[in-house]
Amino acid sequence: MENKYNVGELIYDGNIYDGMNIEIADLPFYSRWFDKKMNGSILELCCGTGRLTIPLTQEGYNITGVDNNTSMLKQATGKANELKIPTRFIESDIRCLDLSEVYDIIFIPFNSIHHLYTNKDFFKVLINVKKHLKKDGYFIFDCFNPNIHYIINSEKEEKIIANFSTKDGRKVVIKQTMIYENKTQINRIKWHYFINGEFDSIQNMDMRLFFPKELDAYLSIHGFKIINKFGGFEEEAFENKSEKQIFVCKKEY
């Protein structure tokens, strides 16, 4: 069995990423929680192209965005400059983050923890979050609630998951196939890219799945108290059929 997991380079193409990810249903949720620390400092880990960083900065929040992908940060910086928004971006791997500041809120949005493929990687991030979080600060993140029935059905067929045009004029269609590895809890997703009507490439979009009780335990072990656990961005109660796991935590020790 291949043990190398990654995300393909084309997935990190800034224009393709922005063309595909136009949904901001999570924006009001984060904004509501940031209101509790309106004048505080906020750190966004895995900020990508600034999908949330930029509009939240426009709302008046003091946010620093961190990502380890140069292409994504270049896209984010370009958008912020075009809008004349004074947003600070830092290039860093969140597993070895070492900043000289502590923050009132640290958040990891948009299912980004699924790209931490091992417990060791995830635990490094939790340790770094705690190191950079103020004593009364919030740690907020969202991820999927694993749906085994969806995975089984999706393994049976290739299906179109995206059809859009990019800002730089490319027509993009993405078809998806997947195979789930029980041993590693990693969903090995392949995105088949068709650009301007022609097949371009197959890109990996591997995602580690985290089960509900598993995450609860990991957070507790690393000194976080779960204040709220929601099943959706309207702050619905987390239930068996919830699509999301949305955590609001505080540092317990």
Image (cartoon, rainbow, N blue to C red):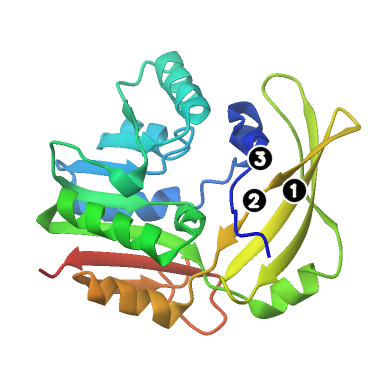
Nearest the viewer among 142 and 220 is 220
Mark 2 touches mark 1? (CB < 8 Å):
yes
Is tag 1's residue or tag 3's residue first in the polypeptide sequence? Answer: 3
- Give the residue at the far front of this rendering: 1
Element at label 3: helix
Task: Give the image location of residue 167, x and y in percent.
Answer: 67, 22
Residue position for label 2: 205
Element at label 1: strand
Residue position for label 3: 20
Q: Quadrant of the C terminus?
A: bottom left
Task: Report the disc number at residue 191.
Answer: 1
Task: Report the disc number at residue 249.
Answer: none
Task: Give the image location of residue 60, x and y in percent.
Answer: 26, 34
Residue at 37%, 15% in the rendered image: 84
Q: Amino acid at mark 1?
A: Trp
Mark 3 touches mark 2? (CB < 8 Å):
no
Nearest the viewer among 183 and 160 is 183
**100 left or right of 97 in image:** left
Quarter holding residue 7 = top right
